[in-house]
Amino acid sequence: MLLSKSCEYGMRATLYLASLDEDGYVSIGTISDALDISFPYLTKIFQQLNKSGLLTSHRGPSGGVALTRDPAAINLYEIVVAIDDEALFTECVLGLPGCGNADPCPLHDQWVDQRDQLATLFRNTSLAAMATRIQDYNVRLTVT
C-alpha cells in the first residue's frame, strides 16, 4: 500500500471514532482493543492527530480521545497529511528527487494523473461518509 502502517491505523481509528453513536471521549484502550492495534503505537498516532488539530484528548478516568470537528467536516486527505505528510500527493512514486515534467521518471506521466485522482478522492471523502458505510453495510475496520 502507498500509505504507511501508521496512516492506515490512523484512518481506521478515526473512522472508528466517527462510526460511534455516542459523542464524547473514548479511551485509547477501547479503540486499541476494538481494532487490534498496539496501545503504545496507537497512542503515538493519536499524538500526531492531536497535534494536527483533528483529535483532542483528555486524561483521567473518563478521558480518552475525541474528534475535534463533526465527522462530515473531516476528510481522509487531512488524516493522511497529518500522519504521512503530503508526499503521497506531491512526490515521485519511485522516490526519485527532482522528478517532474522537465525531468520525469518512467512512471511520471501515469503517476501524476493517478495521484491527482487519489488526492481528489481523499479530499472528497469525509469520515461521516465512511462511518455511514460502516454502520449501514456492516463493513469492517479490523483484520479479521
Image (cartoon, rainbow, N blue to C red):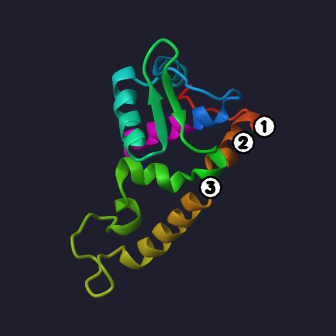
Q: Amino acid at mark 2?
A: Arg
Residue 123 picture quarter: bottom right
Q: Residue at x 39, y 21 (%)?
A: 39
Q: Could you say which disc has been placed on residue 75 in the image? A: none
Q: Which SS class for mark 1?
A: helix
Judged from this view, the residue extending furthest toward the top is 61
Viewed as shown, does residue 64 lie left or right of 125? left
Residue 23 % position (x, y): 65, 29
For mark 2, what is the residue? Answer: 133
For mark 3, what is the residue? Answer: 125
Res 71 seen here: yes
Question: Would you say the residues marked 2 and 1 are in contact, meaning their CB atoms lie under 8 Å apart?
Answer: yes
Q: Which SS class for mark 2?
A: helix
State the residue in front, 22 or 128.
22
Residue 112 % position (x, y): 43, 74
Residue 70 picture quarter: top right
For mark 1, what is the residue? Answer: 136
Question: Would you say the residues marked 2 and 3 are in contact, meaning their CB atoms lie under 8 Å apart?
Answer: no
Q: Work out whether 92 lies above or below 127.
A: below
State yes or no: residue 6 in magenta: yes
State the residue in front, 12 or 47.
47
Magenta segment boundaries in residue numbering: 2-14
User: From mark 2 to mark 1, how far is it between C-alphas?
Assistant: 5 Å
Q: Amino acid at mark 1?
A: Asp
* Few, some or many residues within 10 Å of mark 2 (<14, 14–19, 20+): some
Viewed as shown, does residue 65 lie left or right of 100? right
